[in-house]
Every structure is written in C-alpha cells, then in structure tokens.
Image (cartoon, helix red, strand yellow):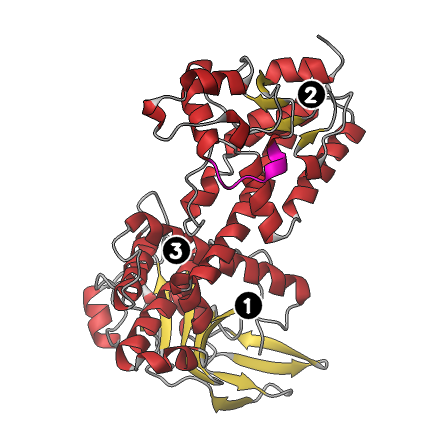
Amino acid sequence: MNRNATASWSGYSHQGKAGILVSLIQINNIIQKCDDSEIEHILNEWLIEYEGAEDFDIKHKETVISRHQVKAKSNGSYPNNYKEVLGVLKYQLINGYLKRINPGFQICDFDKDGNPREIEVDKESRFLHTITEVKGFDLNFIEFNKYFQNATFIDNPNNIKLYIYPDGRNYCPLSTKNDQLKKFCISEIRKILINRNHKFKSSSKEQENIYNALIDTLDNEIRIKHNIGKTFFPNLSFHKIYSIITDSKKYQADYIRFVRKKFYESWLEAQKRLETKKQFTDSHLDKIDIAAKSIYHLKDKNFIQFLKNINPDKYNVNELDSLDDLLDLCKIETLKEVFYECIAQVTKEIFKVEFQGYNVHGGYLLTLISNRPGNIDEVVKSMAKNEHVTKNLFDRRYLINDRINEKLIHEYIEGHADSNWGDKVNSSDIFFHPELEFVDLESAITKLNGGN
C-alpha cells in the first residue's frame, strides 16, 4: 500500500537527513566487514528508499532490512501522541476503493481487497524517529500507569522501537543553528574518509561540503521522482552515496550541479530586486532571463569555463576538486550587484553569452572582479598568473568590473612587473589587445548606452 502523501517534501527536511544518517551508519558497518575489492559490488545491492511504505526503508536487494517513520511533533511527550504509528494498520474495500480504517505502522503489504499479506520487515527492525523524548515508551501497562498517571497508555503490538542516535539518545531535535543530525552525518562521512585514507579525512570544511552535496543530491532525486508520479519512489543506492563521498569525478559533478543551482538562484534574487525598481520592461527582463538560462544550461565543461572567463583574477582554482574552488568562481552577491546589474542597465546593446560580454567598441568582457582601485596591483598580478582562461578572453578592449577604472593594463604590467612578482611578466605573452583596460561598472553602462 503506497502512501506518498508528501508531494512538497524536500530533501532538506528532518526525515531526509535522518535517512541519510541511517544510510551512512549502515555503509560504515558494511565497509568495515568486507574486503576493498568487494565494497562497490556489495554497496550496489543496498539502497535507501523514501516515501514507500513509511518515510524510508533501508533495503538489501528486495529485502527490507529496516523501516522508519519520522515524526516531528514538538509536543509528542508520550506514546499516545504517536497512536497513528503504534496502531495496527487496517484497510477495507469500500465501494470498490481501499480505504484506511485504522492507522498504524505498515509492517506488510495488502492485497486488492485490503487483506494483509506476508510481513515485509521483522519486528526488531521497525523504528520511530522523534524530535523530543517520549516518556514511558518501553513500559508495560502497570509500570506506565505507576509513573505517568496523568497520561494515557497505548499498546505497541507491532513492537515499534525508538531509534537510538549516535549520542545514545532515542530522539534528535529538529534542525536549528546547532544541527545535531548534520553533525552525526558528518561524523559518519569522516569515518568513511578515514577508512579510505582520503585526502579530505582531516578537513572539516570539505566534510561539510560533502554533506551538502549528499543533501542536494537527495533533494534533486525527490524532485525528479515527484515529477514522474506517485508510484516512483525516491531512492539512493549506497554505492551512489559512497561515490559522492570518495569518488573525485562524481564529487566534482555534484559540486558543479550545486554551483549551477546557486548561479541561477542568484538571478532569481536579482530579478526580484530589479522588478521592485519598476524601471525595466518585461521584455527587457525576459532577455536577461534568457541569458541566465543559457548560461545555466551550458555543458559542465563550458559552464565551468564560462565562470573561469568572467573571473580572470582567479588563478588558484586548482583542479576544481573542492566546492570552495567553484563557489569562489560564483560569488552570489557580485553576480547580483555587478553581472546582472550591468546586463539590466545596458539597454542599447545585447549581452552575448558566447562572448561573455558585449561585442562592440573593441569588445567588453563582463567580469566579477570587485576589488577596490587601490588593489589593482594584486588584481593584475593574479590575472598575469592565470592559466585557466581561454586565449581569446583578452581579445577585448575593456574589462568591466565593479570599481576599477585604470590606464592600459600592459603599461601597468611593464611598470610593476618587478622581483616582487616573482618571474618577470611580459605583457605580450599574456594580453592580446594592446589597449586592454579596466572600466568600472558605472562607466561601462554609460559607454554601452551611447554616452561618453
């Protein structure tokens, strides 16, 4: 019997995180017991499935190893507050339709007439997750009434157990600034990285990035399955979870998707701000939307190269195996305040995605450079070291940026490329336009709109 009643469910919710935690604990148990050569094969046989019989199942092949119901009741202090979980689930055929006549934890499937079929999950593997302590949960009738005379006792015929978390408590509070579920998950991620002697085994920052990638992957899976239909349950194989944590290529792919999402969200935020100004026509905002979507839909390689091209001062991006590397190329506030602001304010010329700017007056590259004018030495030095940009990038007359409005860059290099820069820098080796110069945002908008 399929529930799937949470159409707007998000992977960022409490039950999503609880499922990830249970999966990570099980993965650690598995890899501790098998040889390295067997890990991938074995993990492919395991998965977590959401929104099926209950909130989530842990499965080995087709067998339910454990079944979990998650309840976020802030006032759920006694077992009677969970009678819809602790009761015996019953269905009845009424007017040709199966209708639930008694709520309860689903321990078996039902036939078309509402009759229970074989047990799906054994009695030691049925779990209830709560966000508050449930008093007297394991007490019998006599003991419960002895200690809690003002509460109502309820039977637990299906032997539902409270899930025990890594800190030994049988409940875990909802996410706050002190997100305990997140901490538990990161601890399990760390164990996997240590087991594999991974380069991020001692990096708390990268472990948190991995956690974010897992949650984002789950959220994406849920949205996809909801769009397909209610008979398709969101799931993640243990191998996929393990790969996100340990496989560099998969890790980078998830990061790119995360950054791609952040990129487009920055446009949605900018769009709201531009709409409040009420100075732009709908058709003009539509043109910006088309540009933003065109960038968003670039292939991974081209999307990353686009970000590199509009960040010519970011030379130390390594191999992009860190989420921070990618986020450093996708500064949300700079995108809103410089990138989209320029595209919005320039009404006489069209921003060309493939050109990363405006192909007029010798060419304008729209960059995310946001340094103060006094830091031009640092900016030009970084640009001179950048090996990641394409050669045609500097076949431009102007580099649009937030605040720097300076003389010709090759003259600046020739005047400042001294021993403090390390190797001597020759402008002819780097910059291809003899008149390349910075132009600040305000000046660029004026020029592109036909002013001086």
Name the mark nearer the viewer: 1 or 2: 2
Q: Is residue 388 magenta?
A: yes
Residue 409 falls left or right of residue 188: right
Range drawn in magenta: 386-393
Q: Check the image and report above or below for 95 versus 403.
A: below
Residue 341 % position (x, y): 63, 24
Residue lying farthest to the right in this orientation: 283
Q: Secondary structure at mark 3?
A: helix
Quarter of the image with the C terminus is top right
Q: Count the marks: how many?
A: 3
Q: Is residue 147 magenta?
A: no
Q: Amino acid at mark 1?
A: Pro
Residue 234: which numbered mark, if any?
1
**Visible residue check, residue 173:** no
Q: Secondary structure at mark 1?
A: loop
User: Which residue matches tag 3?
Assistant: 211
Q: Check the image and report above or below for 122 versus 179.
A: below
Looking at the image, tell me whether mark 2 or mark 3 is earlier in sequence order. Answer: 3
Q: How many other residues sit within 10 Å of disc 1, few (<14), some (14-19) or many (≥20)?
A: many
User: Which residue matches tag 2?
Assistant: 345
Residue placed most toward the observer, 449 or 163: 449
| Mark 1 vs mark 3, CA separation in Å | 18 Å
| Mark 1 vs mark 2, CA separation in Å | 43 Å
